[in-house]
Amino acid sequence: MIKKMKYAAAPILLALALGACSDSEEAAPKEETTTEETSASTEQPAEQQTKLKLPAEKDVVVVVNDEKVLGNVYNSVARQLESSLATQGKDTAEAENADLIKEQAITVIVGNKLILQDADKKGYNAEDAAVEERLEELKGQFEDEEAMNAALKENGYTMDDMESQLREQITYENYVAKEMKPAEVTDKEVQEAYDGFAETAGEEAPAFEEMEPTIRQSLEQQNTQQAVYDRIEELKETAKIDVKI
């Protein structure tokens, strides 16, 4: 699942991480929070919660066509991949899983960077108004600016980093929307996907008419992800990639 989702998820990883921080803060009143929960969510920075061996925030982890990517970016990606594996019941302290996360994190970062570099060459960018609107939406997930700044610091970022991340996210979205030509989803594919779901769900499966829009959208997203993956593979053919970790 990580491999299939990685390219579409890459541009919004930091935003998701910050959103998760705000959600956890609002989930329960402070007086009802246990000592263990407080220690895990507020007293320790994210780097201490992970089982992974992570680079320093300012370390160069990979260079893509002479553009350096630092440890804070890698760590944000790696921790979220770690969380994904943990929900599958896999111990990320095990060498095999740690190696998988490292490989996937580098793949995500390199693929995302190649897309953004190609987008820049082709003149794609994000308007200031769109960045500001996205930033305000993110701020709205926190009690106040102080809480957001604390979440940024915990993830090894500044507000300038956040604005840059959101600008890249919007640029990425614009590029994918205009440049990608995913395969069209056929009615037969939708029916086959529903049949497979219905076979598993049995009598609890909703009617096809109810599920059809959701299934079609999911298949369209998969096709878009595949188109992005194909473009990244093309860009890799002439790219200079130097992994430092």
Image (cartoon, rainbow, N blue to C red):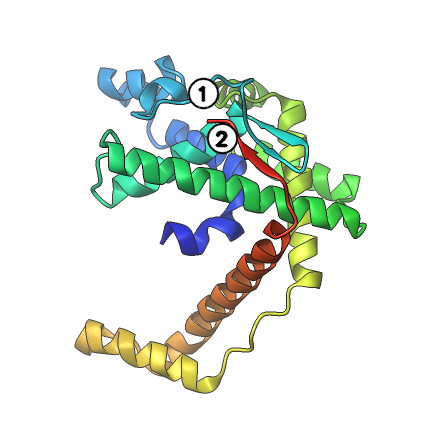
* Front in this rendered view, residue 58 or 87: 58
* Front in this rendered view, residue 28 or 77: 77
Residue type at numbered disc 1: Pro
- Vertical position of residue 55 compared to residue 209: above or below: above
Q: Which residue has dot 2 on it?
A: 74
Q: Which mark is residue 55?
A: 1
Q: Position of residue 96 (x, y in %)?
A: 26, 37
- Please indicate whether residue 106 sits to the left or right of residue 161 in the image: left
Distance from disc 2 to disc 1, alpha carbons, whole Å, reads 8 Å
- Vertical position of residue 119 compared to residue 25: above or below: below
Alpha-carbon neighbours of circle 1 within 10 Å: few (<14), some, or many (≥20)?
some
- Give the structural element (helix, strand or loop) at label 2: helix
Confirm whether residue 68 shows in the render.
Answer: yes
Residue 79 in which image quadrant: top left
Q: Are marks 2 and 1 in contact (CB under 8 Å)?
A: yes
The furthest residue to the right: 123
The furthest residue to the top: 43
Q: Residue at x 64, y 38 (%)?
A: 166
Q: Which mark is residue 77?
A: none
Q: Position of residue 100 (x, y in %)?
A: 34, 40
Q: Position of residue 153 (x, y in %)?
A: 52, 18
- Vertical position of residue 104 compared to residue 98: above or below: below
Nearer the N terminus, badge 2 or badge 1? 1
Residue type at numbered disc 2: Tyr
Q: Position of residue 144 (x, y in %)?
A: 56, 23
- Please indicate whether residue 129 sits to the left or right of residue 116 in the image: right
Q: Residue at x 40, y 27 (%)?
A: 25
Quadrant placement of the N terminus: bottom left
